[in-house]
Structures are given as structure tokens and as C-alpha cells.
Image (spheres, rainbow, N blue to C red):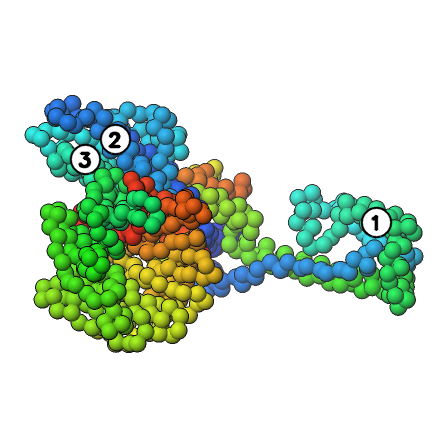
Amino acid sequence: MKKIIITLLFFIFSVQNANSLIKVDITRGNLDPLPIAVSPLHIDEKSEDLKGLKEKKLGEEISKIIEKNFKSTGLFNPLRKDAFVQRPDIAHIKPRFEDWKLIKAQALVTGKILVKDKKLKVEFRLWDLTAAKEMVALSFTTTPTNWRRVAHIISDKIYERLTGETGYFDTRIIYVSETGPKDQRIKKLAIMDQDGHGTKYLTLGNELVLTPRFNPTNQLVTYMSYFKNMPRVYLLDIETGIQEVVGNFPGMTFAPRFSPDGKKVIMSFAKDGNSDIYSMDMETRKVERITEHSSIDTSPSYSPDGKYITFNSDRSGLQQIYVMRSDGTQVKRVTFGKGLYGTPVWSPRGDLIAFTKVRKGRFYIGVMRSDGTGERLLTENYYQEAPSWSPNGRVLIFYRETKSDSKGKGFSAKLWSIDITGYNERMIKTETDASDPSWSSLLSK
Amino acid sequence: MSRGLLFSILFHGFVIFMTVLTLPFMLRDPVDLPPIVSVEFIQITDKTNIPFAPKAREILEKVKEDKRVVSEQAPPADKAKEKPDRIPMPEDKKEIKKIVKKKQNPEEIKPQIRQASEFEKKELFDPDQIAALIDKAKEEQAETQKKANKLTQSSVKNSFARGLSLSEEDALRAQIFGCWSVPLGLPYDEKLLVRIKLKLKQDGTILKSEILDHERMNTPGQSFYRVLAESALRAVRICQPLKVPPTGYKRWKDLQLNFDPTEMLKG
């Protein structure tokens, strides 16, 4: 009898213990960049020789571009290639996971290139080394001259798979290229890939150009130019180079910008000496007044859904940021901090507004929620402004000027980028001095 | 026959009764009391002036003796734990001795005396008052010790209910913190909890891992959840063998890790 009772009690306690599963909460991790190995892409033996294409080096070059893209994000740490153990061709078929784990890699990119019938076929695989499985595998076929874009598209796909948000590598940046001394600047419109490669100049520099902005399809650019001291808003087709004048506007005209559907251009100009916000229908060229106030209203920017507009105005006495409905109703002030706020730009995600703030002679680039709360200043400097969002709403590009000395020397204007977390501030290399950048949306959607 | 039936009824009744008592839903969650860290603020003058009171010296010696007994009985591992609860260590005693010698030197305390008013002087050198203070301090110390003991007991109970002691849990947590690279593209306003159930080997390596809400990984518009879940799983795999206690394998062979980066992302 005793034995039975003891057995029963033991059974009951063991059941009770089995029910109590230990739970441990993990609420912190590290923000160290993810170690990733990008193996040079293997060249298929069946590849044909093509004039002007260094095929043998293509695999290496594409992997270098991918690595550079990853490094620029601050989220990934591409590992040195001399530590790689496995050959690219074998690694692409089936990597020896243990070998790659030895060099502390957590993800691996492998690929293969085939040039046939004057076409370039690039395939890649992304491997999760800890789980020993393939995460994504894709193949692209294009004209061989497009190989750099293929590298950027691959980078985007990997970025998307590893971070959960869309990439921003297959994009371009348009900016104002500046040369010459500070008082005699020659300003041209220039366009380049987001990594600073392939710069092209779109205007000759005879006229002063300002504030270029892409339309949602990236085919068109709107910008301002002074022709015989008269401000004009232009429309430029990047692919064809065809340029047209959208309109002559009186007085001070500022910052034309496309609506999210690309059907309208919103800008501010001074009519009867008073700057207000206007929109122009691109089909009918009909101009519609949106704000009507005795103060100076400038720098309008649409929300991604097109329902709201943010702009800056000095109607409260000091320049602050406001939000209103796109028809001009329900104007609401959103910034109340000390200092001046300007150049508001709505994030493509719709959650944040980027701005420039001036306080005590210092310039800040910051972000806040669209209702004005949660203001975060990301970077501070002597002079910097004009933030523009990356298409995924994670990175901001802006320009920064350095102070010139008493002789007027030492002045420079450069493009910089910063993550919305305030980390990873980087200078973007440009052939000349640069200002007023605008980031395109993804070219391959 | 009837005796056998009676035994059978009693036996079955007992089994049903015990089962009902021990069913999981009948269990109440243990109250998770965070450990209270007691911090005592002492006037420096109280300490430095102790040697001037003969009564205080006696009490000090008594305290020293008491402490010696405690230190002899206590296992070495517990000593470190007892330090925050203000049970003085032999080293502390040495310090007190040193201070005593120093303060007995009239040259050193001279400036202090000169600066003090007559009233302050009285207060500084009144041995009875100091002795009373020490008595009071000792009583308070004893009370806090009692309280601390109670707390330790309750926290031990809690950790037993959880299966891991606080330090074991902290060690495991700290290990995984280092291995988990949090994806930065996560939305701020979504529920970001990833629950991973693990079956462990005795050496802490993983026998089986399972994401409990895996169906969410393939839900449209929840691609970030997949990335988050994968990063958590990666962290566990990189970390293995996990820092689990050397004993009590049955307690921790099944483990659930709840990854939630919400606080971290909000900064």
C-alpha cells in the first residue's frame, strides 16, 4: 500500500514538473552588423566572349558592388574574401556550411554568370549558414552592359530578405553639381547611381539650377532654373533629354515637387509679394492656390497617400512646420520647439517627416512623427539642409557646406547620408561639389 | 470482495482527488517579487567617531565576534551574495581598524575640531549618543537581515517554480543578448514577440527548436515577422551550447525563449 502511495505521489509530482515549462524573456540583442560572406560569382564555362566585357572579372566585380552596398548600410559586415575556404563554383551548388561558419559568417551569397547570345544571365543564392538552408534564389537576364544594375538588384533582394524591408540600392540620385569659386558658382544638374557611380550631367551650367525632384516613375525630373533672372519651373525627361518649361512664375518661386501620383506639381511662389502654396495639374497646366495667408508659406511636400501636405510657414511669427489637407483646409501647426523649422519632407512610409532645424546658428537634420511628436535630431553642423528620403524611408540624404576662410577658400558642399536611427553618417562621393540632392524611387519595382 | 471494492473506490477517489489538485489550471502563478536591494545611508561621522566611545568599542567587538561565527559557517559562495545585504566582511573590519588608528591621531582631526562649533563638538564626542546610535543601527541591521532572509527564501521559491534561479536565468539571457543581431527594419507599432520552444541536450546544445507562432511567418504583410523569427532562431543556434545549469537537466531540458525587441527599438 505504502509503495503504491509513494509511486502515486512521485507520478503526480513528475506530472506537475513537466507542466512548468521554463520561460526566459529576451528583450535585448546587439546592433552589430551581420557578418555576411559574398563569394565571387562563378563564371559558367559555356559563357561566350563579348567585346568590351571583361567576363572573367565580372563575377568579382558584381560581388564587390554587393559588398560595398551592404557596407554602406551599416547593417552588414562583409567578410574579407581571403578568408574564404570554398571555391565559388562549388559553394554555389552546395556550400560546406561548417567551413563558412568557421569564419563567423552568418549568411552567404553565391552566384553564377552566363553570357550567351549577347545576353547576361546572373543567378544568385542566399544561404542561412546557421540553419544550413537556402533563403532565396533568383535569376536575372539582361543586356551585358546592365551588369552594375544587376548587382544593385541582387543587393536589394538580399537586403529585403534579411531585414524585412525593401532595399534602396537600385536607385539614382539627382543633385546640383557645383564648381568654381563661391561667388561665381557654376551649377549643373547631375544624376548618378546611389553608390556615386555613373555621373551624368543634364544641363550645361549656363543657367542657375535649383531643387531637382524626381516624379514617382523616375522618368521625369522637375527643377527650377533662372532664365534671364526669371524663375522657371522645368520638366526634364531623363531618358530622352527632352526639356520643357512648365511655367513662368512671378517673383520668388521655390521647390517644385511632384504629387505621389505624378499628376500634379506643388510649389510655392510669390504673387503680389506674398508667398503661398500652389499646385499645378500637369495635364491641363491649371494652377490652383492652396494656401491664402499673409505669411510666407514655402517647401510643400505631399504625404505618400496624397491626402495631406506639409509645409513651412512663419504665420506664428517664427518659421515652423504645418500640416494641412491637400485642399488647403485644416491647417495645423505641428512643431513648437525652439528654433526655426524648414524643408519638411514626408517619408515614403508615411510615418515620419524629415526637416531642417536652425537653432543658435547651428543647423540640424531631424525627423518627427507626422503629428509633430517624437522629434529626433539626427545630425548637427555648421550648415546643412534639404533632406531627401531613400525609397524605403530608412535613410536620409542631405547636403552640408563647410565654412570658407577669410580669403573665401576652404568652402565645399558635399552630399551626406544618415540612417534615421542617427547612426551611419556617411559622405557620398561625387565628382564635384554637390547640393540639393533628391533620391529616386526603386528603378526595378 | 467488498474489501477489494472498498480499496478500489478509495484508491480511485484518491487518484481523482490528487489529479484535480495538481491540474495545471488549478495552479496559481507564483508571485514574482523582485529582489529588494536595501541601501543604508550612514553619516560618515557616525563611523569615524565610533572609537571614541568605549561602549561602542565593546559593541564593535561583539559584532566582530558574531560576524566571525557567520563567516565560518557560511559557505564561500554565499559570502559574495551576502555582501550587498550589508553583512560586513573581514576586510571591512580591517578598514574600520585603520580608520580607528587614523582618527586617534590628534593632529589629523585637529582641523575638523577647529571648524566645528561647540554644539557640534558635543555631538561628535558624546560617547553615549554614539553608543545609542550603534545600538539602534544594530537593531535595524538585524531587522533588515531578517527581512532579507525572508525575501531570499521567497525568491528561491519563485525561481524553483520557474525552474532556473535568477543568476542562472541572467547568465542564459546575457549569453543570448550577445548572439542576437536584431534586424533594424522592424516596424515600431506591431506586436514583435517571437516564442521559440527548445528541447536541449544535457550539454546545452539544441536537440529541437520550434517557432510557436510559425503560421504568422507566412502571413501576407508580416514579412518582418519572418525576418525577426529567423534572427531569433539564428541567435539560439549561434549561442549553443547554451549556458544552462550543470545540474537539474529535467528542469530545463524543455525551454521557451520569448524574444521581444520592442523596448530596444523604441530606445
Q: Which residue is mark 1?
A: B99
The amino acid at mark 1 is Ile
Q: Chain of mark 1?
A: B
Q: Residue at x 29, y 52 (%)?
A: A436
**Is circle 2 on the same chain as circle 1?**
no
Please tell me whether residue A64 is drawn above or below residue A382 in the rendered image: above
Give the total number of marks visible in the rendering: 3
Q: Which residue is mark 2?
A: A61
Residue B259 in the image, given as x and y percentages of width and height: 41, 52
- Looking at the rendered image, the quarter that the N terminus of chain B falls into is bottom left
**Is circle 2 on the same chain as circle 3?**
yes
Q: Which residue is mark 3?
A: A147
Please tell me whether residue B244 is drawn above or below residue A52 in the rendered image: below
Q: Chain of mark 3?
A: A
Q: Nearer the viewer, residue A164 or B173?
A: A164
- Which of the 4 quarters of the picture holds residue B130? bottom right
**Is circle 3 on the same chain as circle 1?**
no
The amino acid at mark 3 is Trp
Residue A357 in the image, given as x and y percentages of width and height: 40, 61
Q: Nearer the viewer, residue A129 or A191?
A: A191
Does any portion of residue B69 appear in the rendered image?
A: no
Q: Residue at x 23, y 41 (%)?
A: A199
